[in-house]
Image: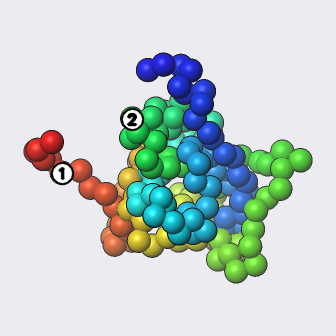
Amino acid sequence: MDSELKEEIPVHEEFILCGGAETQVLKCGPWTDLFCDQSVKRPKLLIFIIPGNPGFSAFYVPFAKALYSLTNRRFPVWIISHAGHALAPKDKKILKTSEDSNAQEIKDIYGLNGQIEHKLAFLRTHVPKDMKLVLIGHSIGSYFTLQMLKRVPDLPLMLPTLGAKK
């Protein structure tokens, strides 16, 4: 893959308050708010990456850019940090809205249960309910993903079809 192509891919960094904890979200592609863009160009699918420990989102940027390129730049690829694993620089604003249910603190947010609830709270607030999801977890992120599926079995997932003809 051409390294020049990778450099052209936009990656937007946000810090939000989610479940009472600062959270870094890296968004690959031009879509930073999936609710505001109601045009026909709004993507129908989000690729959502949940990292392994230590929850360092930036480590996954080359992977996110590759996924974005391999999907012909049609779908956003977002990476979420673990709750409390990334602190906003002093000059960065932490985004929060008054009606944001993520502003409510999650009990034991730094434990396994809290980290799972943290990811679900983010999806509930920042991703439209009708948007299909591809969840990618690495290491403990895979465990979080499996637990999310147990807790919310009706998550709108894009499932692979085995043996599908091209």
Q: Which residue is mark 1?
A: 161
Q: Which residue is mark 2?
A: 70
User: Residue sitting at 77 percent across and 48 percent down?
Assistant: 87
Left or right, 100 with reference to 157:
right
Horizontal and vertical percent position of residue 90: 89, 47
Horizontal and vertical percent position of residue 29: 56, 45
N-terminal-most mark, 2 or 1: 2
Q: Residue furthest right?
A: 91
Mark in the foreground, 2 or 1: 2
User: Residue sitting at 75 percent across and 78 percent down?
Assistant: 98
Q: Quadrant of the C terminus?
A: top left
Query: Closest to the observer: 62 or 82?
Result: 62
Horizontal and vertical percent position of residue 44: 41, 60
User: Residue sitting at 23 percent across and 50 percent down?
Assistant: 160
User: Quick check: marks 2 and 1 in contact, CB under 8 Å?
Assistant: no
Left or right, 33 with reference to 90:
left
Give SS at disc 2. Answer: helix
Q: CA distance from mark 2 to mark 1?
A: 18 Å
Q: Quadrant of the N terminus?
A: top left
